[in-house]
Image (cartoon, rainbow, N blue to C red):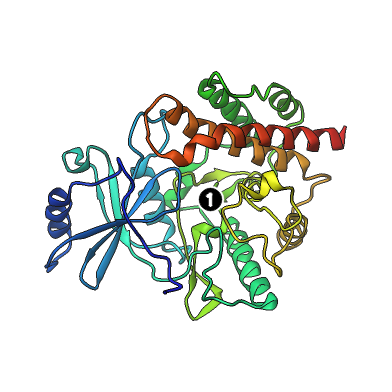
Amino acid sequence: MSVLDEAGNIREGEELDLAKIDAYMKSIVNGLEGEIEITQFPGGASNLTYQISYGEKSFILRRPPFGKIAKGAHDMLREANIMKALNPVYPYVPDIIDICENETVLGCNFYVMEKLTGIIPRQNMPKELQLSEPDTRAMCMSVVDKFIELHQVKVQGTDLEKLGKGVGYVERQIMGWSDRYVKSMTDDATDFATVMDWLKSNMPKDVAQVLIHNDFRLDNVVLDVDDTSKVIGVLDWEMATIGDPLMDLGNSLAYWIQADDEPQFQMMRRQPTHLKGMLTRQEVIDYYLEKTGYKVESFVFYEVYGLFRLAVIMQQIYYRFFHGQTKDKRFASFVHASKYLETRCLKMIEGVN
């Protein structure tokens, strides 16, 4: 069995029209011949990722999810254009092959990019890959370093500069995510009122305006198959923008579930941050602040924000499931996860009061 990240069967309700994709691919890639095969990558609860193969040649197609979509979400043109602008200054971004705005092909905008062949650290590392504790530490450090490197990209004079809305990023995020949560509430959801009020009352000023990923996780990086300490790609740029780097770190830490976390949090783990050799959340914070020089008295606000934002994302996805807009059974438990995240946020808030 291969240690490489591989696509598999397409989930029910997420099939693509083979004939239309075949005609489209042969119109954008010169000399493409043979029979088309479409498979789907298992990760992701947001945009959908497919592998389009013709024999040994493979490409990646990204499209928004099926069903009703929140306004401004899943903007494939934005994601692809960010990647095109970022590729020259941050070489871990895959090349964009084509951006399709013709909705007669799939009924939506989508794009096709190069396929990076490597290892993606998903919930568990491949069993065939026996990493030592030092190997795991080296992999972890390399990923965190790429995160720091992204925040140091010079955006002035590039198309990326247009992403910024100026100072006030922290406030825009807290108000925006609070509004999104209220709009995505279902009858069985918790209200998050105390958490939202605390965040609104404790907003710090922006520490900087830099390019941020907004979903930087281990399962969004691609590792060299021959050297797991080497990152060859960073994926999923849907939510990238200009904003506060500590807010971006808070987002990432919401997914950073470590070995000593309680069972309810362990059930939500989507990346192998529990392995021996991995940094703890506090070690990530300390290392990041040391390398970047940013100063902060307490990181609790950013951690609570990250957990709240994750809860909103899960609730938005659950809203689609609740109202029958998606059949993906993975989403049935998301409302319970959101409730747990509220409890976790409240404990952190109590700890600083």
Question: Where's residue 227, x and y in %?
Answer: 53, 79
Looking at the rendered structure, the kind of residue marked 1 is His
* Residue nearest the viewer, comparing 243 with 331: 331
Q: Is residue 313 visible?
A: no
Question: Where's residue 196, x and y in %?
Answer: 68, 26
* Residue nearest the viewer, comparing 97 with 69: 69
Instruction: Determine whether 194 is above or below 318 in the image.
Output: above
Determine whether the residue tagged by mark 1 lies in a helix, strand or loop. loop
Give me the residue at 47% from left, 27% from top: 319
Give me the residue at 69% from left, 75% from top: 133
Question: Where's residue 239, x and y in %?
Answer: 48, 44
Q: Residues within 10 Å of mark 1 (few under 14, many from 20)?
A: many
Give me the residue at 37% from left, 47% from top: 48
* Residue nearest the viewer, comparing 183 with 190: 190
Left or right relative to 132: residue 24? left
Q: Find disc 1 in the rendering and name its residue.
A: 213
Q: Is residue 137 visible?
A: yes
* Residue nearest the viewer, comparing 110 with 288: 110
Left or right relative to 280: residue 45? left
Question: Where's residue 334, x and y in %?
Answer: 54, 36
- Image quarter (top left, top right, bottom left or bottom right) of the N terminus: bottom left
